[in-house]
Image (spheres, rainbow, N blue to C red):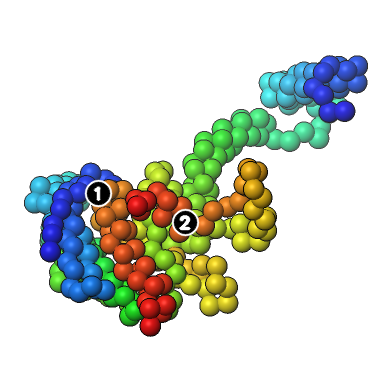
């Protein structure tokens, strides 16, 4: 098991953790930085100052209680649906690939793609929000056409690692994916 | 046949457009400034309301300003999302024909599949 620090596309520090469970099974996890106290207090102060300004204009004290509720509920919704803590990729040769996202509130969402559908794992470049970014993606096989790609599944969407981290993940995945080409010949 | 060189016909078109635009501008100024009673006394009664002399330029300027934002938004909407196959391939690349490999000739131009490109860039050759 090894851990290395990298940077995300926006400059935040992320940590890549690699574990080799067996010769054909690897787990790669990218951990995003936690919610910062300074950004949380900045947003809370901004919302409460705006609510106090509204209260001074309208003389209605319900505005203040509403602002408190909005802040609390907004924080809970953000932690449960938006803020991703860790994204991990579990590659099991001859079985499939499992992609897990764990949110800050503890929720985990998992997707499993069986190896028969996986054509390749590649690093693709695309335009995203006025920038060109590298991102890792799984190419799904088109059942009718052996050369065709039916769908693209982008990985590590919220942590967005930079190219150096992606190359490490790509090399680890390719070592396992190459085994499925040589395995049928050896049997 | 399609050269941008000056020709007699182009000079005539240009002069006609110049005269037409000058006349149109003079007509617009007359309609906007001359009082209605004077125009009625000349017998010209069927004009649009003078309100439009100010409203149309205002509409045009606002439309130009919105056009900047609209073009930016259309560009953002037409960009393929990260999970679409248009970032990998397209119709022309799918239907391309493979030319036979000839010795000592430059290989034919083709769209190289992304798996091959990745292997060449990121996996070190042993």
> Dot 2, how many residues are within 10 Å of its Cα: few (below 14), some (14-19), or many (20+)?
few
Q: For this view, does A87 lie left or right of residue B99?
A: left
**Above or below A97: residue A43:** above
Q: Which mark is residue A148?
A: none
Please name the residue that numbered disc 1 is placed on. A8
Residue under the point 91% across and 21% down: B9
Q: Which residue lies furthest to the bottom in this view?
A: A187
Residue A76, position as x, y percentages in the image = 16, 66
Residue under the point 60% across and 35% down: B60
Q: Quadrant of residue A71?
A: bottom left
Mark 2 residue element:
helix
**Above or below B22: residue A45:** below
Q: How far apart, in angstroms, are the residues tagged by discs 1 and 2?
A: 26 Å
> Dot 1, how many residues are within 10 Å of its Cα: few (below 14), some (14-19), or many (20+)?
some
Residue B88, position as x, y percentages in the image = 50, 57
| In this view, the mark in front (1 or 2) | 2
Residue B89, position as x, y percentages in the image = 55, 58
For the question of whether residue B28 can be seen, the reply is yes
Mark 1 residue element:
loop
Please name the residue that numbered disc 2 is placed on. B116
Q: Which chain carries label 2?
A: B
For the question of whether residue A67 can be seen, the reply is no
């Amino acid at each position: 098991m090894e851990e290395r620090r990298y940077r995300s596309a926006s400059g935040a520090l992320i940590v890549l953790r690699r574990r080799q469970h067996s010769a054909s099974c690897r787990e790669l996890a990218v951990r995003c930085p936690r919610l910062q106290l300074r950004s949380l207090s900045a947003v809370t102060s901004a919302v409460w100052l705006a609510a106090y300004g509204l209260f001074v204009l309208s003389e209605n004290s319900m505005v203040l209680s509403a602002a408190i509720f909005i802040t609390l509920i907004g924080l809970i919704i953000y932690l449960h649906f938006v803020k991703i803590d860790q994204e991990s990729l579990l590659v099991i040769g001859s079985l499939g690939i499992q992609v897990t996202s764990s949110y800050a509130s503890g929720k985990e969402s998992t997707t499993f793609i069986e190896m028969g559908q996986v054509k390749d794992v590649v690093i693709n470049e695309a335009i995203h929000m006025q920038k060109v970014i590298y991102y890792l993606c799984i190419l799904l096989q088109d059942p009718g056409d052996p050369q065709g790609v039916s769908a693209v599944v982008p990985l590590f969407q919220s942590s967005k690692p930079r190219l150096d981290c992606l190359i490490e993940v790509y090399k680890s995945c390719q070592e396992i994916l190459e085994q499925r080409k040589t395995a049928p010949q050896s049997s | 046949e399609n050269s941008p060189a000056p020709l007699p016909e182009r000079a005539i078109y240009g002069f006609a457009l110049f005269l037409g635009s000058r006349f149109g501008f003079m007509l617009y100024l007359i309609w906007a400034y001359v009082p209605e009673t004077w125009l009625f006394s000349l017998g010209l009664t069927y004009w649009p309301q003078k309100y439009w002399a100010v409203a149309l330029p205002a509409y045009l300027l606002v439309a130009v300003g919105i056009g900047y934002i609209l073009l930016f938004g259309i560009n953002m909407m037409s960009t393929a999302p990260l999970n679409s196959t248009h970032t990998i391939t397209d119709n022309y690349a799918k239907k391309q024909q493979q030319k036979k490999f000839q010795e000592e000739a430059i290989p034919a131009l083709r769209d190289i599949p992304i798996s091959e490109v990745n292997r060449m860039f990121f996996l070190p050759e042993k």
